[in-house]
């Protein structure tokens, strides 16, 4: 069963994504901010995909993605950003940091799952 | 039904205990007939039934356990009770009575274990079946009426409420900090809190059940607008309009309450407020999530694919300027390839492959064009041509879902603070309290020596110990630092000092001191009152302070510290203090004190009169600190939870009010009894058994009384053992040949002793309060409680009972 790391400072958002993913048969690891996520990622190198929020305390999403990509062993891991539509989020910033794709919050369960499935070739 | 030999000794004891529960149940049912809306009574019935379940369980009365469980499940969902429910309850009571009556008819026979007791008749009776049918049909109809198939929605809502509250508090604190120190980091925090509030509200709004909840829509609106506003001020480097933001926080608070408690709010006012805020952003509608979508994805692979490809085009645009992203672009191509492979369209895979090689050759423009072509083809492709593949995919999906899902989550989080919904904690503590009643039963069984097997015995002992520890931990969960409460006053003080044109600086000390959450809630209002008083009546206006040679800025200190079994909270101001002469005059005027007394009373003592009902030193009534009937309520509230209030004041220097508070509010389960018109509570942990005995069975020898219970000599004690200087005629009890009530008490030194009581009133839960007048050096008292009719009743501590 593949492991997915969910990074979000909102417990509710984490639980919601975890619920959807678990129903689709994935294992979920949760992290409350970028710094926590890095720790979780290093202790679970078998994580197959990362879904991250951007706006977080301690370490924001973009910094977190950059740090992940700095490591040779995590160059290939798919990273999806979840973001709200109206956020003045410059998509190029996400790609520059090293994200592969993004999803719009609130995420539709079907969109989330089918995107993950294509990313992980399930 | 036959009972095992081992059971018989238990049965005899259970029969005695059950009498009380049945009596309780009968009384409560009679009360609830008159008071069908009294939720407290329903809870009481549930508890009594639960105790009956426990006892029945021990002797395997499964049919009884089943029916009572069903009844309890039904009762838990009721707010009021109707005639039908009462009828059912009465029938159930009859069944319980019949069962135990039947058993007790056989209980005295020596060969009880040989006899087949006809309990099946009860189980097969018309009444039993009627109740079961009724309860099952009610349970089924409730199942049907469930509005949502998404069982986690409620959980999600609970989490939303916790998070919303948390974010609003953090937001307010960040604003207060920002007001004092214009720090750009704080601005980012403020923006993030608005952002989180917005995001959470949108998620909840995306469920059809809540999509038109007006409070939520407005929470979303406000947080959205203000997030933009803060963002704008960060970008353009302008100061935040702090007052506007405080207003927004207040509206969010109102809306939060309106959402949680379903109360209306002034929509027009908020509309007007929002109109004045200029942000040029367009509103984005919240996309609706269909509930069943969670289990049945509706977005097709081709839709996802088109979305991914359009994103990949954006990526390629970035790539042109940032060639170092090439490697990652090649990874991003993989999911698109996966999708095309699923569609089994070789031509399209060809196109993608050529784009991939363009990227590898650093020809990003070519790649962009190729992918654009791919995008257009997919967009135009008739949906029907790929539909079939989608159906196949869905089929495969379905099969996959049938596998057992592992739901392990790594819940380790870094933060030492765990935010938990209050209700969950209360539920946990209730459950643990229930466990402690099981624990009492276990201790009882251990004492009865019915367990022969050493291993079982050890494990039961261990279990017993663990339950005790669990209870202690549960109590500690409720302890929270007072700092949260203190920092709430930052806002109060800010708003008040602006209103009164005073300058006040708040100093908080001892925020880490922990106290029971329930106590925090109780003292919130009194403390607010004291702080308001300090600003309104204590702190002088800045000019006056300067004239007096004081610092222009007044100072209010909130200080908490431990002191023995208490927590002291001080409210200190450096204002004008309380003039004892003014208090004297006022107290005389209000007839609170006689002219003779007023001459003899010291300055320190006289200022305590400000806590008397009806006292007010302020001549002008204002909206800030009320009309003076507040302080006596403050005192009252604090004393009600076993606390004390002290005041010290020096004219011209300031005032210090100290609240001495207990660390926790403890609850004890006990038996309310009456001895010679005095009421007492005996904690259930001491109560071994309740007995009725003919007074002729009590023997005396040289003023020592005893009786025989199950061939064991048991000392009999009277109220005088408990109450000092309490004399009454013991013989009077014993001549009438009356039935007398005995409570068998476990005593460390003497084993079991029997206490004679006049009346057994009820078993219930009581809040232990430290009541100073009673607890003077008497180690026979735990403390006291105040029962429903307002009487103060001592709670007995019988550990050190000496006969």
Image: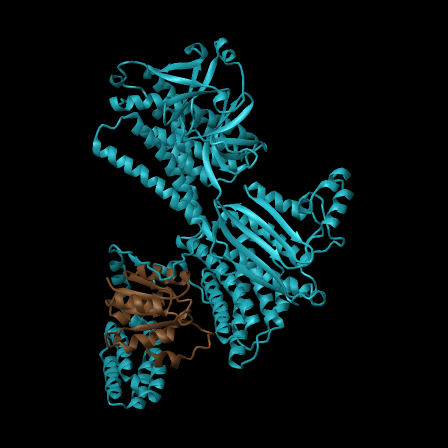
Q: Look at chain B in the picture and name its colour.
A: cyan
Whole-percent x, y for residue B538 in the image:
67, 57
**Res. B580 in view:** yes
Residue B367 in the image: above or below residue B746: below
Whole-percent x, y for residue B488 in the image:
55, 59
Quarter of the rendering containing residue B218: bottom right
Q: How many marks?
A: 0
Whole-percent x, y for residue B172 in the image:
54, 64
Q: Nearer the viewer, residue B295 or B380?
A: B295
Relative placement, left or right, of B330 versus B530 is left
Quarter of the rendering containing residue B362: bottom left
Q: Which colour scheme is used?
A: by chain
Q: Which of B543 and A51 is in front in this view?
A: B543
Image point (43%, 11%), residue name: B700
Relative placement, left or right, of B577 versus B128 is right
Q: Nearer the viewer, residue B658 or B477?
A: B658
Whole-percent x, y for residue B457 in the image:
25, 32
Q: Look at chain A in the picture and name its colour.
A: brown
Image point (68%, 64%), residue name: B499
Image point (65%, 62%), residue name: B496
**Res. B59 in view:** no
Image quarter hosting the N terminus of chain B: top left
Residue A68 in the image: above or below residue B104: below
Quarter of the rendering containing residue B609: top right
Image quarter hosting the C terminus of chain B: top left
Residue B204 in the image: above or below residue B428: below
Q: Nearer the viewer, residue B287 or B490?
A: B490
């Amino acid at each position: 069963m593949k492991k997915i790391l969910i990074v979000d400072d909102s417990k509710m958002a984490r639980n919601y994504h975890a619920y959807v993913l678990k129903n689709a048969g994935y294992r979920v690891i949760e992290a409350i901010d970028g710094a926590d996520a890095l720790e979780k990622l290093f202790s679970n190198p078998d994580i197959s995909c990362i879904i991250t929020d951007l706006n977080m305390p301690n370490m924001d999403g973009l910094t977190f993605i950059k740090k992940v990509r700095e490591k040779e062993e995590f160059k290939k891991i798919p990273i999806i950003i979840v973001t709200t539509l109206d956020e003045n989020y410059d998509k190029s910033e996400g790609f520059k940091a090293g994200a592969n794709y993004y999803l719009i919050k609130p995420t539709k369960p079907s969109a989330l799952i089918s995107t993950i499935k294509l990313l992980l070739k399930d | 039904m036959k009972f095992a030999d081992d059971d018989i000794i238990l049965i005899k004891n259970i029969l005695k205990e059950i009498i009380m529960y049945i009596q309780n149940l009968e009384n409560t049912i009679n009360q609830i007939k008159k008071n069908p809306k009294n939720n407290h009574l329903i809870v009481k019935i549930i508890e009594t039934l639960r105790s009956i379940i426990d006892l029945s369980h021990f002797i395997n009365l499964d049919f009884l356990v089943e029916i009572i469980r069903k009844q309890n499940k039904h009762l838990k969902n009721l707010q009021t009770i109707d005639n039908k429910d009462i009828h059912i309850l009465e029938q159930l009571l009859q069944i319980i009575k019949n069962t135990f009556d039947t058993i007790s008819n056989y209980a005295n026979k020596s060969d009880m274990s040989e006899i087949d007791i006809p309990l099946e008749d009860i189980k097969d009776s018309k009444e039993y079946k009627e109740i079961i049918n009724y309860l099952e049909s009610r349970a089924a109809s409730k199942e049907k009426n469930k509005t949502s198939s998404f069982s986690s929605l409620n959980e999600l809502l609970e989490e939303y409420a916790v998070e919303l509250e948390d974010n609003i508090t953090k937001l307010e604190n960040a604003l207060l900090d920002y007001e004092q120190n214009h720090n750009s980091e704080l601005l980012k925090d403020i923006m993030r809190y608005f952002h989180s509030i917005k995001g959470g509200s949108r998620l909840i709004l995306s469920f059809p059940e809540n999509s038109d909840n007006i409070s939520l829509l407005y929470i979303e609106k406000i947080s959205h607008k203000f997030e933009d506003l803060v963002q704008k001020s960060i970008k353009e480097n302008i100061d935040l309009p702090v007052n506007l933001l405080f207003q927004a926080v207040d509206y969010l608070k109102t809306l939060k309450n309106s959402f949680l408690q379903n109360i209306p709010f002034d929509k027009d006012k908020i509309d007007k407020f929002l109109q004045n805020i200029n942000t040029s952003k367009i509103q984005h509608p919240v996309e609706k999530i269909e509930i069943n979508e969670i289990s049945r994805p509706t977005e097709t692979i081709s839709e996802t694919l088109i979305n991914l490809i359009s994103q990949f085009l954006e990526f390629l645009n970035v790539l042109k300027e940032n060639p170092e992203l090439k490697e990652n672009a090649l990874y991003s191509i993989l999911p698109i390839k996966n999708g095309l492979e699923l569609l089994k369209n070789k031509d399209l895979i060809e196109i993608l492959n050529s784009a991939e090689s363009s990227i590898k050759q650093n020809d990003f423009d070519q790649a962009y064009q190729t992918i654009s072509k791919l995008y257009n083809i997919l967009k135009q492709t008739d949906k029907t041509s790929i539909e079939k593949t989608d159906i196949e995919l869905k089929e495969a999906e379905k099969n996959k879902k049938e596998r057992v899902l592992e739901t392990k989550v790594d819940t380790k989080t870094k933060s030492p603070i765990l935010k938990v919904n209050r209700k969950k904690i209360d539920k946990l503590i209730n459950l643990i309290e229930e466990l402690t009643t099981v624990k009492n039963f276990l201790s009882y069984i251990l004492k009865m020596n019915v367990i022969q097997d050493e291993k079982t015995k050890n494990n039961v002992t261990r279990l017993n110990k663990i339950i005790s520890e669990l209870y202690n931990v549960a109590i500690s969960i409720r302890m929270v630092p007072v700092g949260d409460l203190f920092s709430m006053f930052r806002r109060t003080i800010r708003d008040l000092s602006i209103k009164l044109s005073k300058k006040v600086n708040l100093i908080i000390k001892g925020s880490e001191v922990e106290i029971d959450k329930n106590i925090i809630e109780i003292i919130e209002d009194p403390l607010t009152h004291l702080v308001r008083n300090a600003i309104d009546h204590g702190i002088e206006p800045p000019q006056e302070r300067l004239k007096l040679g004081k610092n222009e800025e007044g100072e209010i200190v909130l200080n908490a510290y431990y002191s023995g079994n208490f927590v002291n909270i001080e409210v200190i101001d450096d204002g004008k203090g309380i003039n004892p002469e003014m208090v004297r005059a006022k107290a005389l005027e209000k007839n609170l004190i006689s002219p003779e007394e007023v001459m003899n009373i010291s300055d320190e003592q006289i200022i305590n009169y400000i806590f008397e009902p009806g006292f007010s030193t302020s001549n002008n009534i204002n909206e800030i600190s009320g009309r003076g009937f507040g302080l006596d309520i403050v005192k009252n509230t604090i004393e009600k939870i076993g606390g004390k209030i002290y005041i010290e004041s020096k004219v011209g220097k300031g005032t210090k009010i100290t609240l001495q508070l207990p660390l926790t509010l403890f609850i004890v389960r006990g038996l309310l009894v009456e001895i010679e018109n005095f009421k007492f509570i005996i904690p259930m942990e001491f109560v071994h058994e309740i007995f009725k005995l003919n007074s002729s069975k009590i023997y005396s020898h040289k003023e020592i009384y005893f009786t025989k219970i199950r061939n064991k000599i048991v000392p009999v004690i009277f109220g005088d053992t408990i109450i000092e200087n309490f004399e009454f005629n013991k013989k009077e009890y014993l001549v009438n040949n009356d039935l007398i009530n005995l409570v068998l008490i476990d005593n460390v030194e003497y084993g079991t002793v029997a206490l004679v009581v006049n009346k057994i009133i009820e078993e219930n839960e009581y809040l232990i309060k430290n009541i100073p007048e009673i607890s003077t050096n008497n180690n026979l008292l735990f403390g006291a409680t105040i029962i429903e009719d307002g009487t103060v009743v001592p709670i007995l501590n019988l550990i050190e009972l000496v006969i």
